[in-house]
Amino acid sequence: MEYVIIMFIIILAGIIQGTSGFGFGLVALGLISLLINIKDASIMLAVAGFSINLILLWRLRKYYKTDRMLPVIVSAAIGAPFGVMFLLDCNVEIIRKLLGIILFITLLQRINPCLSGKRWDPFWLGIPAGFLGGALSGAFGTGGPPVVAYTASQDFEKHRYVACVQAVLGIGAISRIIFLSINGAFTREIIALSIPGIFFAVIGACIGTTLLKKISDKLMKMIINLLLLILSVKYFLF
C-alpha cells in the first residue's frame, strides 16, 4: 500500500510541475518523506525529477531560448555538488527543518507580487539564483524557488518560462545524479523505487502540460499554495 501511495504522489507532483513549471521536488519530497526516511526520499526522487525536466523541455523545446538563462544554468551545475555533500553529511532533523523553511519561502514568493513579479536586472543576478537553486536541487531536489524567482521576473511567455525552468533544473539534476552515484547513494531499495518512479513522473508531467492550457491559473495557484503552507508548518514545527 505504501508503494502505491508513493507512486500516486509522484504522479501528482508531476502534474503540478507540468502546469506550473516547478514543484515536483517540493511536493513529492514533502509528502513521500512522511512515509520513508527523508534522505532516502530525496535520493529516490533524483532520477524521476530529471526525467520530468527532460520530458517537459522536449515537449516545449520550440519555446526555449538561452538568452538571459546561461548564467543560471552554469551556476546551477556548480551548486548541485555542494547540495549533495550537505544531504549525505547532515543530520536528518536539520534537513527536515530546512525543508520546512524552503517550503514557506516558496509560498511567500508565490503570494508576494514584489517577489514574483519584479524583473531581476541585470541578468548576472541569475548567477546566485542558479547556484542556490543547484545547491537546493543537490540536497533536496527542490531547486525551484530561486530559479523560478529569477525566471519569472524575466516576463517570459508562460511556455518559454516553463521550458527555461526545466533547462536549469535539468542541468542541476544531472550534476546531482552524478555526485550521488559517485558517493554510492543509490542502494537497491532506492533503485527499486526510482525506476517505476520515472514512469509515473513522466505520466504526471504529460498530464500537466496538457492541463497547462486548460486549467485555471487561479485555482492551481490556490491548491499549490495551500499544500505548501501545510507542508511547511508540518516540517518546521513537527
Image (cartoon, helix red, strand yellow):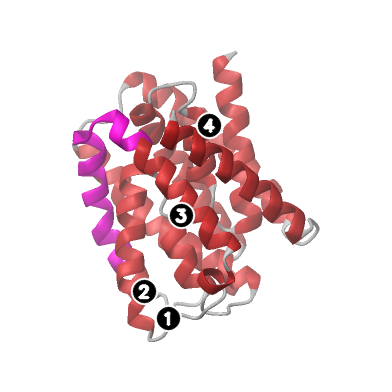
The range drawn in magenta is 73-96
Is tag 3's residue or tag 4's residue first in the polypeptide sequence?
4
Residue 126: image tag: 2
Q: Position of residue 161 (x, y in %)?
A: 57, 70
**Helix, strand or loop at disc 2?**
helix
The reply to whether callout 3 and callout 1 are in contact (CB within 8 Å) is: no
According to the picture, the residue beneath numbered tag 3 turns out to be 105
For this orientation, the residue located farthest to the top is: 1
According to the picture, the residue beneath numbered tag 1 turns out to be 68
Let me know if residue 76 is in the magenta part: yes
Residue type at tag 2: Gly
Q: Position of residue 80 (x, y in %)?
A: 28, 53
Q: Position of residue 42 (x, y in %)?
A: 38, 35
Residue 94: image tag: none
State the predominant SS element of the stretch in magenta.
helix
Residue type at tag 1: Arg
Rounded to the nearest angstrom, the CA distance separating label 2 from label 4 is 29 Å
Rounded to the nearest angstrom, the CA distance separating label 4 from label 1 is 34 Å
According to the picture, the residue beneath numbered tag 4 turns out to be 31
The reply to whether callout 2 and callout 1 are in contact (CB within 8 Å) is: yes
Is tag 2's residue or tag 3's residue first in the polypeptide sequence?
3
Is tag 2's residue or tag 4's residue first in the polypeptide sequence?
4
